[in-house]
Structures are given as C-alpha cells and as structure tokens.
Image (spheres, grey):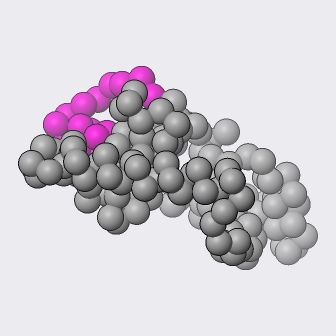
Amino acid sequence: SFGFRGVTKIRESIHAIFLQHAIMESGMDMGIVNANELLAADEVEPDLRQICEELVMNSNPEATENMLAATQRERKRLEQLKKGGGVAQKEKSWRDLPIKERLTHSLVNGISQHIDGDVEECRNAFDKPLEVIEGPLMDGMNVVGDLFGSGKMFLPQVIKSAR
C-alpha cells in the first residue's frame, strides 16, 4: 500500500480488508499495525470495499484499474477540499448523538479527546457516579467485546479502546 501514501482513505481501506481476510480466513495471529490508523472492515464504504475485496483477493482482472480509478477520484476530491472547493455541508457528527451513544462511540473507536467532559455530562444525568460505570461505560465495553468476539475488531483496536 506504499503507493497510496497521501490517500489515507484508500490505504486504510486496503489494510482493513486485507487484515479481515488474513485473520478471519487464513489464520494470521500476529502482525505489527498502527492502531491509530486501523480501520475496521465494516467501516469501509460499500463501493470502496468491493474494489478492495477484488484487489486483495485477486478476484477481478480489472481490480488494479478499478483501484487506480478510485484513487484518482479520491485524490481529486482531496485537492478540491484543499482549494476550498466542494460542497460546504455540515456532516452529521457523532458528537451530536445522545451522551450514552457518544460514550460508546468513544470507547469503540478509542477516542479520548472528549472523555472528561462526556463522562462528567453523563455523571450529572445519574444519581450515583457508580451508575455511569455500571451503565453507559460498561455498555460501551460490551460493544467492544462483542465486536472483538465476532472478529470485527482486532486486539490493537481493543487496546486502543481500553485507554
């Protein structure tokens, strides 16, 4: 994937699909990854996922050309954004979710940036601080455990979540 430097979305998508197949189907049990850049296969957009699957599994003779075309589209999109082009629309943010869902999202994705404020907001919604731990925080860790158990999350991501 070194040829895809600068096009992070493409590079991380290829890695996610490769790791999914290597771990779940081929028995890979050890590898060196950067958990901060690790994308779960389920997070890859469906169209890009199909292209990555075909490339990684060598199931389509046009896979390389399709990936190069997708990469060119992504590079053009990134250039437009740098130039100030592109449609200015507010995307839905996970930060707009209710507090319990924000905590779960933070745990699943290993995001610690807003954790102090979110936990405090959640604590104010409960009678006892222990209810925050036994409720939303435990619910979020259960989601992490379920994802890990089903092979949709790998150990480096779980460790990142535990921070």
Measured along the vertical axis of the image, is residue 89 above or below residue 151?
below
Locate residue 16 relative to residue 81 in the image: left or right: left
State whether residue 152 appears in this view: no
Residue at the spot 28% in from the left edge and 40% down from the top edge: 18
User: Which quadrant of the rendered structure holds the C terminus?
Assistant: top right
Q: Quadrant of residue 120?
A: bottom right
The answer to whether residue 26 is above or below residue 114 is above
Residue 27: name its quadrant. top left
Q: Is residue 66 left or right of residue 160?
A: left
Which of 4/24 is in front?
A: 4
Residue 132 position, x and y percent, is 76, 63
Q: Is residue 117 visible?
A: yes
Q: How many marks?
A: 0
Q: Residue at x 81, y 61 (%)?
A: 118
Image quadrant in which the N terminus is located: top left
Is residue 23 part of the magenta span, yes or no? yes
The image position of residue 47, as x and y in percent, is: 32, 64
Q: What residue is at 32 percent from the left and 52 percent from the top?
A: 69
* Residue 87 screen position, x and y as percent: 65, 72
Membership of 24 in magenta stretch? yes
Locate residue 3, reporting x and y percent. 38, 30
Q: Which residues are magenta?
A: 17-33
63 above or below 48?
Answer: above
